[in-house]
Image (cartoon, rainbow, N blue to C red):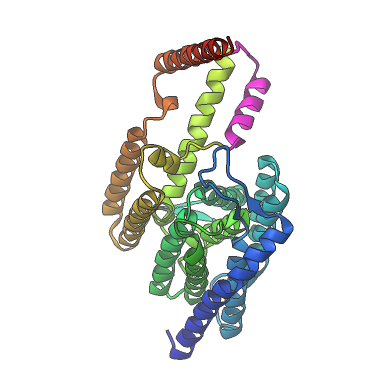
């Protein structure tokens, strides 16, 4: 990399950090004025009202850094159109910001993400092929469009779902983006590396206020932006374009968000099916509708919630997941460099580790059907007994 280009990248990175950090006090005040405060209660684990639009500072710091990068690299071959970031990032922010202020239905938010995927496809970002090592490549052809759109929406949702603990989504995103920046530099994708480093800088400034115990949350306006950037950058490490890098690399980089999202969707689908069976309902349309409603409904039973329920502190859980994410990112670099056979072996090892992690969390939905029914019956009986004893105590105390 030429020295002037390196200097401009450093300037953009520092500017992103400084602006994000400097804007944070203003965001605190704005959140109180517009009522963007996250109240405690329900499935939330914080105990005091907390501002939830920290993503606004991340967004502004990031955009400032991106503009510096675009100015520095004007006229150069950057591998991917800067318009994808300059238009896509504000759109992702807007979807999340409206949700933070007004509260969007999950279905409406998904439609916005899909629309964003359509936009970036026509701006030139296309997942055109799956590469699983040297000499092994599957061209998608006409399937490039739906795969691209679903990839963007899927990664945005994965990051959004894992944003449930102080510092978790920001830290995991920063680790993945740092790895992306390094890998991009290795293949000469200077612009992709610059975008990654600028985003890491904005996240680190935000984490100064968000690391447990958090003073502010990034909100959907932050998680949507980070999810969008991860969707684009994980598939754009190679200067030859999206979809040309080994598919194992994004799988490793996004291992934790993907596993959490997959587990959440699977257990909600099983729960929806059990409800339909117990209510003795039939009919494909009714089944699909119940399944969609259940899958899109938020709950407080993600991987990080399970770890917290076992008595671990928020900071310990977050740092443990940081470590796992760092190991996965290092593995992504190894897969990027090693022969195909070794890459497959490493992927197989990752699958085994994730499987054992999920099993250790003892989700009820993953028990055999008979055991699931028995456990629900026991829970109902215990609830009835507890209510009966409560009524008896109240009756006795009123005599």
Residue 218 to residue 265: above or below: below
Judging depth in this view, the residue of 50 and 94 nearest the camera is 50
Residue range of the region highlighted in magenta in the rendering:
279-298
Is residue 210 at all visible to an observer of this figure? yes
Left or right: residue 93 versus residue 230 is right
Corner quadrant of residue 122? bottom right
Q: Which residue sits at x=43%, y=70%?
A: 181
Majority secondary structure of the magenta segment?
helix
Residue 35 within the segment the image draws in magenta: no
Question: Residue 320: x percent and y percent?
Answer: 34, 51
Task: Tally the marks.
Answer: 0
Residue in view at x 56 percent, y 59 percent: 216
Residue 55 higher or lower than 369, as above or below: below
Residue at the location (47% across, 82% down)? 10
| Horizontal and vertical percent position of residue 350 | 32, 46
Residue in the foreground of this view, choosing between 103 and 239: 103
């Amino acid at each position: 990399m030429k020295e002037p280009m390196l200097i401009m990248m450093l300037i953009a990175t520092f500017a992103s950090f400084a602006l994000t950090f400097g804007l944070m006090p203003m965001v605190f005040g704005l959140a109180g004025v517009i009522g963007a405060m996250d109240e405690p209660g329900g499935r939330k684990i914080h105990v005091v009202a907390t501002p939830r639009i920290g993503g606004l500072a991340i967004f502004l710091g990031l955009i400032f850094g991106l503009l510096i990068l675009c100015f520095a690299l004007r006229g150069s071959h950057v591998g991917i159109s800067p318009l994808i970031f300059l238009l896509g990032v504000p759109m992702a922010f807007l979807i999340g910001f409206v949700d933070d202020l007004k509260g969007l239905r999950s279905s409406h938010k998904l439609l916005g993400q899909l629309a964003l995927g359509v936009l970036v496809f026509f701006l030139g970002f296309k997942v055109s092929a799956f590469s699983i090592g040297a000499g092994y490549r599957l061209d998608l052809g006409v399937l490039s469009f739906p795969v691209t759109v679903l990839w963007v929406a899927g990664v945005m949702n994965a990051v959004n779902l894992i944003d449930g603990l102080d510092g978790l989504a920001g830290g995991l995103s920063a680790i993945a983006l740092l790895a992306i920046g390094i890998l991009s530099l290795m293949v000469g994708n200077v612009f992709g590396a610059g975008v990654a480093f600028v985003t890491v800088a904005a996240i680190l400034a935000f984490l100064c206020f968000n690391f447990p115990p958090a003073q502010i949350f990034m909100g959907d306006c932050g998680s949507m932006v980070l999810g969008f950037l991860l969707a684009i950058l994980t598939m754009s490490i190679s200067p030859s374009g999206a979809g040309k890098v080994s598919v194992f690399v994004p799988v490793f980089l996004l291992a934790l968000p993907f596993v959490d999202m997959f587990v959440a969707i699977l257990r909600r689908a099983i729960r929806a099916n059990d409800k339909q069976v117990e209510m003795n309902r039939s009919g494909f349309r009714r089944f699909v509708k119940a399944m969609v409603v259940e899958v899109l409904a938020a709950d407080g039973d993600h991987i990080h919630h399970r770890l917290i329920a076992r008595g671990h502190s928020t900071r310990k859980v977050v740092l443990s997941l940081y470590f796992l994410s760092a190991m996965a990112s290092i593995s992504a670099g190894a897969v990027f460099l090693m022969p195909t056979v070794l890459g497959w072996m490493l992927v197989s090892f990752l699958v085994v580790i994730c499987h054992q992690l999920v099993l250790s969390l003892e989700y009820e939905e993953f028990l055999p059907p008979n055991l699931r029914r028995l456990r629900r019956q026991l829970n109902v009986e215990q609830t009835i007994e507890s209510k009966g004893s409560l009524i008896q105590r109240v009756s006795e105390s009123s005599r």
